[in-house]
Structures are given as C-alpha cells and as structure tokens.
Image: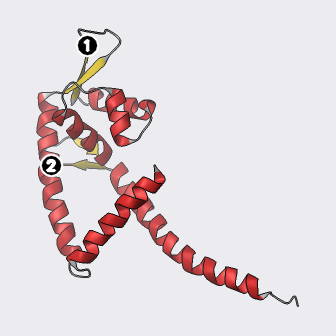
Amino acid sequence: MKKVSKESNQLDQTFRILNERTNCVYQFAMLYNSYIMSEHNYGTGQKVTMIEAHILAYIEENPGTTITALARYWNRTKGAISQTVARLVDKGLVSRHKSAMNAKTVLLYPTEEGRKLSQAHKLYNTIDLSRTLNELLKECTMEEIDSFYKVLGSYIKLLK
C-alpha cells in the first residue's frame, strides 16, 4: 500500500471543500438554465422562453435598438442574438426596419402583440420575484439576500 503524503491529503481535503461550494454554483446554474430555456405563457397565450421575454422587454424599452446593442447589453454574440430575434419576428412579436440613414442598419421594434407580451411578462416577473423573495426570507435574512446579490454581481464581473 502506498503511503499518501501530507500535502496530498491537504490537497484532497481542500479540493473537497472548494468542490462542494462550486458544485452548488453548478447546480444552480444548470437548474436556472433549464428554467430560462423552457417556454412560458406569461398570460397572453403566446409561449416564449425567458431569454426571448427579456430581449423583447429590452426592445420594448429601447425601440429602434439593434442586434449589436442587444449583443453588447446581454453579453452574447450577434449570431446568438440574431437567432433569438428571428424567433421573436417569426412569432409576430418584433418587427425589423432598415434605418433611413444607413440601409445596412436594421432597427428593431416591438409589434403591438410584442408590447402586450412584454407588459404581461413584466407583471408576471414582478409577482414571481416577490414570491421568490418571500420564500427566501423564510430561510435567509434580507441582509443575507443583499449579500448574495452583491457576491453574484462580483462573480459576473469576474466572468466577463
């Protein structure tokens, strides 16, 4: 039987502690990713993913925005944003218009149906986030929740 060095034991112990914490982040990311990628009906009868709903909300709040601006804001490639916008156009929620100043620039606008869905999503989110906060407050203090969001913000900066 091989003799395990003290350094190896310390490494294993440190790894287990750090891995347990990291696995918590991984589990959260995977569960949340599944949630945001599934389609939801926000009350209008139209089903969209959370990503589509948030991109639609951005377009509603910034009419005439571009794929480039969306990609910058959401930290995604223009190709990924273009695919999402194409789905929103296909669903009749967003329209594309060429800029009068530059024919290469495509401006994005919500359709009337898109505005309705965006508003329904905002209402749904407000209610859902309030419920989520109330559930978290059963196990965490408001200070702990605020700390979580502060750490999350710092983690996002690290990842960028």
In 3D space, how far apart are the residues under numbered discs 1 and 2 (Cα atoms)?
29 Å
Residue at point 56%, 80% (across, down): 17
Residue at point 16%, 27% (across, down): 111
Q: Quadrant of residue 74?
A: top left
Question: Which residue is under mark 1?
Answer: 99
Disc 1 marks a residue whose amino acid type is Ser
Name the residue furthest right. Answer: 1
Badge 2 crowding class, 10 Å Cα cut-off, few under 14, some 14 to 19, many 20 or more, is some
Establish if 6 lies above or below 143.
below
Establish if 10 lies above or below 111.
below
Badge nearest the viewer, 1 or 2: 1
Residue at point 35%, 12% (across, down): 104
Total tally of numbered discs in the picture: 2
State left or right for residue 126 relative to residue 2. Answer: left
Q: Secondary structure at mark 1?
A: loop
Q: Quadrant of the N terminus?
A: bottom right
Point out residue 98 in the picture as x, y percentages from the top left corner: 27, 13
Point out residue 63 in the picture as x, y percentages from the top left corner: 18, 28
Disc 2 marks a residue whose amino acid type is Lys
Please tell me which residue lies in front, 40 or 85: 85
State left or right for residue 153 relative to residue 91. Answer: right
Point out residue 148 in the picture as x, y percentages from the top left corner: 32, 69
Q: Quadrant of residue 60?
A: top left
Establish if 42 lies above or below 31.
above
Q: In the rendering, which numbered label is found on residue 122?
A: 2
Q: Quadrant of residue 156?
A: bottom left
The answer to whether residue 29 is seen in the rendering is yes
